[in-house]
Image (spheres, coloured by chain):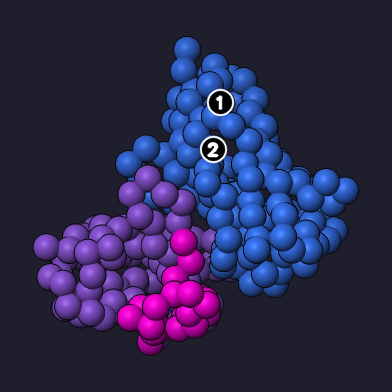
Chain colours: A blue, B purple
Amino acid sequence: EVHLVQSGAEVKKPGATLKISCKVSGYTFTGHYIHWVQQAPGKGLVWMGLVDPEDGDTIYGENIQGRVTISADTSTGTAYMELSGLRHEDTAVYYCATGPGGDYYMDVWGKGTTVTVAS
Amino acid sequence: QSVLTQPPSASGTPGQRVTISCSGSRSHTGINFVYWYQQLPGMAPKLLIYRDSQRPSGVPDRFSGSKSGTSASLVISGLRSEDEAEYFCATWDDNMSGYVAFGGGTKLTVL
């Protein structure tokens, strides 16, 4: 069974950099994309981007591009999402999710990491 | 403003059939696959439908998806109380370098 285990909750100050991890188990890390999705309190889902662990290629959402870096470490089966220049509006739950390479749906999701940006 | 438009809310009584719509422009749902996700309160989203109408294993056949032209629909038959959740449609948008676009979500209430 596939499991995605995300790192714990974070509290950050405005302007800081956040880095969240997502450890995958139960399937071959390569051959699947890892996606990151943001959900602000009471709001909808916003796709941040994906990484293809096979070759490290990334695609980022247009609204977040420039501040986000997504990466994957095939030696540990772990994906990372780094968000810089944090703003209060980055307060959200961040989900990692996996899906088949070459398609864009997410069939297994992590439980989410709660991030609070506060002075 | 999402490229996919969903009604903000829907409702039904147990046993009823409910349809949730997802409307996009031709450059999105007219070409690319539509996916549907269910998010129960306080939980991570769950994939319900992929490639317009395919159900992952474990998803009851009460849930079905379809697409016609620039619109997609999620139909829930035999509505149950545990179906009360937020439902999101999504698709791949080829604009720029491409990205996953989510609809704004539909809150389904089981009366």
Residue A93 placement (x, y as % from top left): 48, 39
Tell me: residue B88, above or below residue A20. Answer: below
Residue behind mark 1? A10
Residue B76 placement (x, y as % from top left): 28, 77
| Residue type at the position of mark 1 | Glu
Residue B105 placement (x, y as % from top left): 33, 58
Q: Chain of mark 2?
A: A
Tell me: residue B109, above or below residue A13. Answer: below
Residue behind mark 2? A113
Q: Which residue corresponds to the image point at 34% horizontal and 72% vertical from the top-left?
A: B23
Q: Give the SS element for disc 2.
A: strand
Identify the image quadrant of the N terminus of chain A. bottom right
B62 in magenta? yes
Identity of the residue furthest to the front in this view: A1
Q: Which residue corresponds to the image point at 72% horizontal and 55% vertical from the top-left?
A: A25
Is residue A38 rendered to the left or right of residue A67? left
Which of B70/A26 is in front? A26
Tell me: residue B57, above or below residue A104. Answer: below
Q: Which residue corresponds to the image point at 56% horizontal and 26% vertical from the top-left?
A: A10
- Image mark count: 2
| Residue type at the position of mark 2 | Thr
Q: Is residue A108 visible?
A: yes
> Marks 2/1: CA distance?
8 Å
Magenta region, residue range: B46-68
